[in-house]
Amino acid sequence: MDSLIARLGLALAIGLLVGLERGWRERDAPDRSRTAGIRTFGISGLLGGILATLAEALGAVSVLLGGFVAFAAIFAWYKAREAAHDKDFSVTGVIAALGVFALGALAVAGDFRAASAGGAALAAVLASREILHGLLKSLTWIELRSALILAVMTAIVLPLLPNRTLDPWGGFNPWEVWFLTVLMASISFAGYVAIRVLGTTRGLLVSSLTGAIVSSTAVTVALARNAAPASNPSPLAGAASLAAMVSMLRVCAVVLIIEPGVFVSVGIPAIAAALSFAVFGALLMARDNGDREGGAIARNPFELGPLLLFAVLFAIVATSSAALAAQFGERGLLASSALAGAFDVDVSVLSALRLVKHSVPVETVGQAVLAALAANAVGRLSLAVFAGPVRFWLPLAGATLIAATAGACAMLLLPSL
C-alpha cells in the first residue's frame, strides 16, 4: 500500500462508497437536479488525495488547507441553492462531502487503514438514517440519562480510580470493582433494550427470556405473582425455568469474557443444568391454554441507586472472599460464594473470577462459580414459594432438582472428560 497510485485509488473508493449511498437515496430524482451523487463524491475523495499529495510534494500544508476551504465553500454554495429550492434544512450532505474529502487526504498523507475504516463507518452511519431516527423517537429521557451515566462512569470515573489493591488480602481493587460494575450494567442494559424494542405484549416467552438477561430472580417473582389468579400456572412455571436457563447461560458468557480458563470447570455442568431447565420449561410451556396475563418487565439497570449498591456489595464480597480464601482456603471461598450467590449471582461470580489473578486455582474458582449458581437457584425457588401458589413453584422445584442433578452428574464426569 506504499504506492501512491494505490492510495489515490483508496481515496477514490471511499468517495464512491459514500456516493453510492447518497446516490441510492436520490436515485428517483431527475438528472442534474441534485448537487452531488456517486460521481461527485468519488471525485471529492480523489481531490482530497491529490491535494494531500501536492502538499507533501511542495512541503506546504497550506495547499491542502486552502483546497479544503475552497472545496467546502463551493460545495456548500451549491448545496444551499439546492436546499432553498427543495426547502430542505439538512446539512448531512455537506458534512458527508467534507468527510469524504478529509478521508481522501488521510488515505494519501496518513494511515490508509484508518481512512478505509473511516470511509466504511461514514457510509454505514449515512445508511442507518431510518434506524437511528426511529431509535431517537422511541428513546425516553430515562434511557438517554442511562447512556449519559454510562459515559460518565466509563470515561470520567473509571480513569480516576486507582488500579491497585488497597487491602492486605488483595481483594479490593477500586478500578476492577468499578469496571466490572459497568460491565454487568451494560450487559443488563442490553436486555433492557431488548424488552423495550420487543415489548412484553409479544408474549410470555419473549418477555421472560429477555427479562432474565437483566434478572432471572425478578422474572421469577413477577411470574409467581401472576400465577396466583391464573387457572393454568404451568406455562408461567415453564417461563421461570427458561429464565433460569438464560441466567446460567449469561453467567457462562461472563466467565468466557473475563476468565476463559475458568470456563473449562464451569461450562459443562452449567450448560447441562441450563439444558435441563430448557427442556423442562419447554414441556411446561407446551401446556399453555392461552389463559395467562402479564409478563416480566425489567427495570432500567442504570438507575444510580441500585448501581451504587451493586458496586458496594461487590466490593464487600470481593474483599471478604479474598480474606476467607486466604484464611480458610478453598472452603472459605466456597462458603462466601454460596452466601453471596443466594442474593446476587453476578456479585458472587465476579468476586470469584477476580481471585484467579491472586493465584487461586482455576478449579477452585470454577467450583465457587458453580456454588453461586446453585445457591442462586435455591434462593430464586425460595422467593417463588413465598410469592406464588403451589401449582407454580412445585413444577419449578422439579425443574430445579432435575437441573441440579444434571449439573452434578456433569461435574462428576468432568475429570474423565
Image: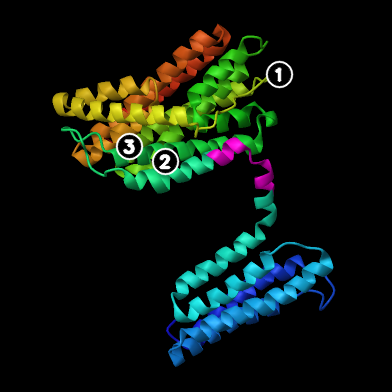
Tell me which corner region of the image, top left, top right, bottom left or bottom right, holds residue 290: top right
Report which quarter residue 335 is drawn in.
top left
Q: Is residue 141 magenta?
A: yes
Q: Quadrant of residue 237?
A: top right
Residue under the image location 78 percent in, 73 percent down:
81
Is residue 190 in view? no
Magenta region: 134-145
The crowd level at tag 2 (other Cα within 10 Å; few <14, some 14-19, many 20+) is some
Can you identify the residue that label 2 sits on? 183
Q: Residue 231, percent across and down?
A: 68, 10
Q: Earlier in the sequence, mark 1 or mark 2?
A: 2
Residue underneath mark 3:
177
Q: Amino acid at mark 3?
A: Val
Element on which disc 2 rests: helix
Side of 236 where 338 appears, left or right:
left
Q: Secondary structure at mark 1?
A: loop
**Above or below: residue 3 compared with residue 208:** below
Choose mark 1 or mark 3, whichever is in front. 3
In this rendering, the label closer to the viewer, 1 or 2: 2
The disc label shown at residue 412, or none: none
Disc 1 marks which residue? 289
What is the quadrant of the C terminus in the image? Answer: top left
- What's under tag 1, amino acid-wise? Asn
Q: Amino acid at mark 2?
A: Leu
Q: Quadrant of the N terminus?
A: bottom left
Residue shown at 83% from the left, 77% from the top: 31
Task: From the top left corner, tell me how far across and down residue 52 is, in percent.
Answer: 50, 84
Residue 285 appears in the figure: yes
- Neighbor class of circle 1 (other Cα within 10 Å; few <14, some 14-19, many 20+) is few
Residue 62 lies in the magenta-colored region = no
Q: x and y percent of residue 360 in the render?
A: 20, 36
